[in-house]
Image: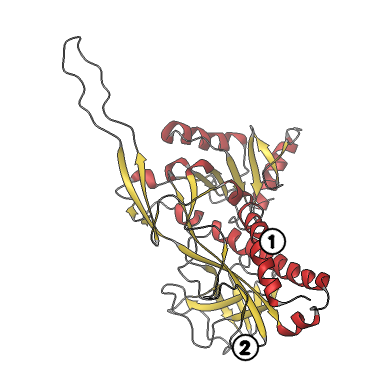
Amino acid sequence: MVTLQTADNALKEVYLGVVADQLNTSINPLLARINQTTSDVWGKEIRKLAPYGINGGIGAGDEDGQLPNAAGNTYAQFVLELKNLYGKIEISDKAVRASQSSAGAFVNLLNAEMEGLIKASAFNFGRMLYGDGSGILANITANTTNTITVDNVKNIIEGMLVDVVDASTGAPVQNATSLRITSINRATKTATVSGILSAGSLEPDSTTYALCVQGSYGKEITGLSAIFKDSGSLYGLNRSTYSWMIPYIKDISKDSTFTDISDVVMQTAIDQLEEVADSKVDFIVCSAGVKRNYQEYFTSYRTNVDIMELAGGYKAMSYNGIPLVSDRFVAPNTMYLLNTKDFNLHQLCDWQWLEGEDGRVIKQTQNKPTYNATLVKYADIICDKPSGQAMLTGIKES
């Protein structure tokens, strides 16, 4: 007979390893290339010494003259708080009891929940990789009773639980938290939510309102949008003081008109990174429209597109042996050229089930006839050399 203890053991002994591997390597091609490590984690923080520049103890001199002065490596310290990442599944007591006499039915029940968790994780963690850590999904431009109009639907999906917040402070709007998105019209950029709001109450005035994942404002991992800035602070260091914290950012458009991508434009960025930062690009990612534009570039010269296979089963176009992929969460008209060896996901531990004092991972939801289990991971991403990365914008989409 299948029991909750059986399910508990299955989650810990069978599902955990498989699900952790898929979350780490199979939900996003960029995440699959980022090294994961427990080094440099101190308590609740990541503290990492980052070398920059070169050793200064080099020089030429006379045969019997003074030797060069010693000047060791230069370092800066990165400080970043570990982010708390969660994934939760829930099973009703009725479903558990209905499958107690059939091990196969219970396995199917668990499989369905785990597949749903992986699908949701693929969307949300993939989105975070290209975000800025703020957790903002889109800005709100208008609303009716239960329909919200936003400036971008790329980061939202049906089933999401979202909060409406003040975009500048993160303060939640009263009676507008944990709203469930029930449908999305991507043509009109409108989302229907389960909550009831006053018509027009969220239209921008002195306040800009935004959507973020429930309870997540300012708590998401430090993605590429946080790295690709030319001002402000990153990892506790001010870019105005540490210029090597500024990536190569180039708008290739001419006269405010988007421009076709070309090998020359891409190679110019790659050469700049090699000459200035001694960085070797090993991964290129762009929006789907930019990838199509690059395919048209190949077609116009009657050149075959080389395809390569990446770890995790992903397929990619090839630019001089460098994989080029598209990602749904890359901003339109944008391409990133990255040295993924400079990126590390620092974590306190790999994915683990949240256990109670009795060692169980499946717990009854308070005051509800359901049981839940929660996966946790405490981690964040650091790029050791921001100046070794490039972003091209202003690219025409096809």
Q: Quadrant of residue 351?
A: bottom right
Q: Residue furthest top?
A: 63
Q: Quadrant of residue 180?
A: bottom right
Tell me the CA gap for discs 1 and 2.
46 Å
Residue identified by numbered label 1 = 14
Residue identified by numbered label 2 = 145
* Tag nearer the camera, 1 or 2: 1
The residue nearer to you, when weighing 349 against 273, is 349
The residue nearer to you, when weighing 11 against 80, is 11
Image quarter where the N terminus lies is: bottom right
Q: Position of residue 385 (x, y in %)?
A: 43, 43
Q: Quadrant of residue 123?
A: bottom right
- Name the kind of residue labelled 1 in the image: Val
Give me the residue at 69% from left, 64% from top: 119
Q: Position of residue 366 (x, y in %)?
A: 58, 86
Dots 1 and 2: beta carbons under 8 Å?
Answer: no
- Up the image or down, 371 lies above or below 354; here it is below
Q: Position of residue 12 (x, y in %)?
A: 64, 65
SS at mark 2 in the image: loop
Q: Residues within 10 Å of mark 1 (few under 14, many from 20)?
A: few
Of the image marks 1 and 2, the number of the one nearer the N terminus: 1
